[in-house]
Image (tube, rainbow, N blue to C red):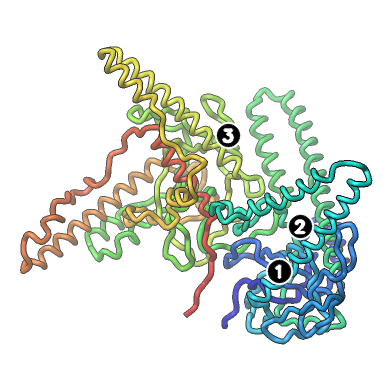
Amino acid sequence: MPPHFCPMPYRYAAVRMDPVAMVEHLQDPIALSKARAIQPKTYLVFMEGVLELPFPGKPWYRFCVCPIGTSLRPEDNANDFRPEMCIPILPNKSHPTGRLPLVPDRAFPFDNCYHWMALSIYVRVRARPEGFEEDHAIRLSVDERLRMDGLWEEDDDGRDVETDDEMSSFDQRIGSSSHSIHSGGTASDTESMVQHSPADGIGDVLAQMNIFGDPTHDTELFPLVDLWFEITDHLKQEDIPDPMEIFKERDEIVKIIEEARARANFALNKSLLELNAGCHKASEDCTGTHEAVDVDTKRVKDLLSANATSPPLSMPRFCPMSHRYAAIRMDPVAMVEHFQDPIALAAAQAMKPKTYLVYVEGDLELPFPGKPWYRFCVCPIGTSLRPADEANDLRPEMCIPILPNQSHPTGRTPLVPDESGPAFPYDNCYHWIEFAMYVRVRASREGFANDRAVRLGVDEQFRMMRLWEEDDERRDVETETETEESSCSHDSDSSDSIRSEATAPRSRTTTTDTIGDVLAQMNIFGDPTHDTELFPLVDLWFELTDRLKQEDIPDPMELYRERDEIVKIIEEARSRANAAMNASRRSEPVDRGAADDTRDDTPGKNLKARRPRPKHLRRKERGRRMLGGMKGWFRMPYIVIWP
């Protein structure tokens, strides 16, 4: 079996922490010196489970592992753990109660090992270029794992009985009612059973599984370990350490990291105070207050970037990720080459596509490795207020500036890109409302450096949606006012009819929608009704300043003109291809293609003109695009299948 890019669970392995690699990115000499002083040991563990869906190309993978001991479990009166709460691993058969040992699928090399109850730790397993060989791994079968779970349940039940007896005895001593305590325990048991009821929705089950990783975890504090399935190459029986020592090592490196973070925050706050004092002094001497504020903003952004303590950048991915700013350029020639149409090829070669600044709002399908392109919804970014569009009731102020741009007619607060990444490099950019396009992003051989991109955090994404909702509300109020004014010229019956229609409740996605309904709206497998061939095929780069200077950012409307031009070329090529195919079928009955010939193939006839949409349709479309951006949470495992 070829090596896997990620280790598999339910196997025994040897692990060793790398404390130096855990602090290098902090660029803190004190932390680095303390990390080098740690002498990590190699521990024997059982891979209990993966904490997230694994993806190829990641620098590490999160796992829950259970350290293995060489003795009975130490007694812990505080948590009611007794020495017999453990399970031997064959060939070890020693146990105070005669408990049968766990039997691995192949010979276990040590004869003194035990699983200890309720002993596990979260770690990050570092990826290896050569992968992980499964041929040498010792694993537990499904039957043995279920038996282990059953034994832990027995030990848990024993602890609960003893706890209930102690509580009952205590109640009798103090003269209080024991009934309330026993009923409370029963309620707790019932609640636990309800939480795992088969009637739970799939959303609840997914939430309990945490298959996409727990966002509340401070992953930087998880021990970064190297892992080997060749146990005897890294451990001798007499060298297997006490499992409790891995927790001591973890606590030591966590303390080092938190101290380094505290020093970094202190230095940042001190620098900001000095900068603030300097700016106040400068503003007293300067007449240009706005200029001073702009300089202050730029210096703060530079300072935040210089003092960032984010983890090291991960390896490039085969597919770009959403909610990032990027530069794109269409390749019209590649879009028509497959037609083998000289006229279309010449027309495409005559086009001069520009490089545009866009916001990658969401992917339109689940991405899989090896595809030639990936469908995305992108929002072109403008360098001015939105052009007025009276037909669709769109006004110039319906836009949002991007920091460091702070200019807006209504004083709207700009969107602030995530400070853990690079600063947004342009000071004149805006998001425009109702402005998006579907594209195909061509796969890049070297991958996409998603972590180097300027991105919006979750809070800013939701704030942008709320601002669009506010603009929508204003449009609806004005539309209803115009409707009421125009209805004054009609009779009262007609007026009542119009008003009732205008104020009728709109259908919305409710909290009772099933996960199936939500997934259906997300179109995670792509919309089969899309004519994907008409989506612009673009190259995408996250290195903005390498591709675009501020003065060269084009008008976003030009991207639509380019799209319309290539669509016209493609439809004309299709029309010529259809005509040639019909000519080659002269021997067939004339009426065979009658149904198809009713379609008007005139270029541009199949492109619907844009028209104002009701509010509920605008919300539905925006919600679908947002859900598209959330599809990263529901991605299938990136598992490469070999023949």
Count of picture labels? 3
Front one among 100 and 550:
100
The amino acid on which the numbered mark 2 sits, given as a three-letter code, is: Leu
> The N terminus appears in which quarter of the rendering?
bottom right
Is residue 327 among the parts visible in the rendering?
no
Q: CA distance from mark 3 to mark 1?
A: 56 Å
Q: From the top left corner, tell me how far across and down residue 293 is, in percent.
A: 66, 30
Mark sitting earlier along the chain (2/3): 2
Front one among 80 and 356:
80
At 66% from the left and 36% from the top, the residue drawn is 297
Q: Which residue is mark 1?
A: 150
Whether pointer 3 and pointer 1 mark residues with C-beta atoms closer than 8 Å, the reply is no
At 64% from the left and 29% from the top, the residue drawn is 291
Q: From the top left corner, tell me how far across and down residue 316 is, in percent.
A: 57, 62
Whether pointer 2 and pointer 3 mark residues with C-beta atoms closer than 8 Å, the reply is no
Q: Which residue is mark 3?
A: 414
Where disc 3 sits, the SS reads loop
Q: Where on the picture, by quarter, is residue 341?
A: bottom left
Instruction: State which mark lies toward you, 3 or 1.
Output: 1
Q: Where on the picture, by quarter, is residue 50?
A: bottom right
Left/right of residue 170 with respect to residue 422 in the rendered view: right
For residue 221, the mark is: 2
